[in-house]
Amino acid sequence: MSLPEDVIQGSRLAISRLLTQVENNTPEGRQVLDFLFPYTGKAHLIGVTGPPGSGKSSLVNQLAKEYRQSGGAGGRTRQVGILAVDPSSPFSGGAILGDRVRMRDLAGDPGVFIRSMASRGALGGLSASTSAAAQVLDAAGFEIILIETVGAGQAEVDIARLAHTTLVIEAPGLGDEIQAIKAGILEIADIIVLNKSDQAGADAAERALRSMLELAHPLPHVFDSHHGTTVIQQVKETAGWITPIHRTIATEGKGISELIQWIAHHAKYLHDSTEWLRREHARWQATLDELLRESLVARWRSSVPEERYREIVQRMVARSISPWRAVDLLTDKKDA
Ligand SMILES: Nc1nc2c(ncn2[C@@H]2O[C@H](COP(=O)(O)OP(=O)(O)O)[C@@H](O)[C@H]2O)c(=O)[nH]1
Ligand SMILES: [Mg+2]
């Protein structure tokens, strides 16, 4: 059998090999992706973002276990793919002992595939290769794909664009970090998870998060009591989705099945509204733009002599031409 067929059959070796090619952006990898594309679109992509140490990896582990054991809200076990983009993630090679212990529950389960994405590589290429890796797992039959990324600026926004559902993980006791959350992170949060709710300061953290939500979306909010966990809901005007703040204790597995219910609830909302389609459009348009940019720049660079390019840069450094003038000169190929 060929590599793409093996991937569709779910061969772990084939998936690993293809993911390596995808990460290295090889022509063969792109060819296989091209073949696999019609087989994608079935998976629910779940972004998990937030500051380092908030418990993203712990939660991803627990979510994967729960999806495998009970299948979550659907009652059907599903295959789970995990993509760890967080460079500090225990999935990314340099695992400390505690992280290995946590992961042992998942290792050896053929229904779970874990891959860490290198954060090195071409500038801006990480979101493209993460998207491609998600397509590989999607085509291979992984219906749930968890994508962990550290909340460090553009990365979480890119992941949010890639994911259907974005979880923003916060924890008490991360100092002033709660205040430092940009309004942007609340914009991308479909579900806010207050992890480590066993720790002191959980109530204060929840109040802080709630007031940030109120600032971002000044609309009436709903208080709800959910399995002993207070869930504060805030009406998000634009999307019509009520962003909950949900408490968990990842290390004890507390609040996990309820979190899976929230995720399922969100998926249902996306499908029942036009939001799923809207996000798909936004996602593929962004992908197309990125690929176009990459390909046009590469093609153009190969048509311009290296000395000419360096000369133009040199003239900018000497302030004899502006960057805008440089672009005009290089693209119009006019003499200057
Ligand atoms: N007390 C407590 N510790 C937790 C909880 N969740 C995770 N941790 C611990 O917090 C540390 C960081 O967790 P990790 O999942 O690696 O965070 P990440 O950097 O966001 O991926 C680890 O030592 C975990 O064992 C929790 O709910 N309560
Ligand atoms: Mg991590």
Image (cartoon, helix red, strand yellow):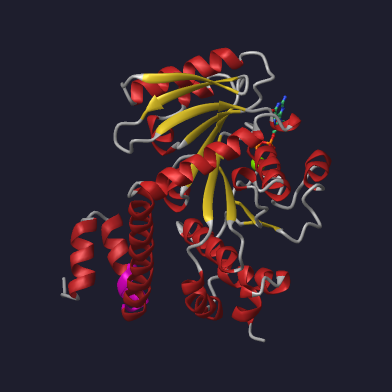
Q: Residue at x 69, y 51 (%)?
A: 92
Residue 213, image x, y percentages: 40, 24
**Quarter of the picture holding the C terminus:** bottom left
**On screen, 31 above or below 288?**
below
**Quarter of the picture holding the N terminus:** bottom right
Decide whether the magenta segment is chiefly helix, strand or loop.
helix
Residue 16, image x, y percentages: 68, 68
> Relative to residue 320, is residue 17 drawn left or right?
right
Give, as a single range, the part of the protein colored magenta. Answer: 304-310
Question: Residue 59 colored magenta?
Answer: no
Residue 274 in view (yes/no): yes
Q: Toward the viewer: 138 or 222? A: 222
> Relative to residue 312, is residue 198 drawn left or right?
right
Image quadrant assignment for residue 320: bottom left
**On screen, 2 above or below 191?**
below
Q: Residue at x 62, y 31 (%)?
A: 54
Q: Residue at x 17, y 73 (%)?
A: 332
Question: Residue 308 colored magenta?
Answer: yes
> Relative to residue 334, is residue 171 drawn left or right?
right
Q: Toward the viewer: 49 or 80? A: 80
> Relative to residue 68, is residue 294 drawn left or right?
left
Q: Quadrant of ligand 1?
A: top right
Q: Toward the viewer: 38 or 316? A: 38
Q: Toward the viewer: 282 or 64? A: 64
Residue 196, image x, y percentages: 66, 25
Total label count?
Answer: 0
Residue 320 in view (yes/no): no
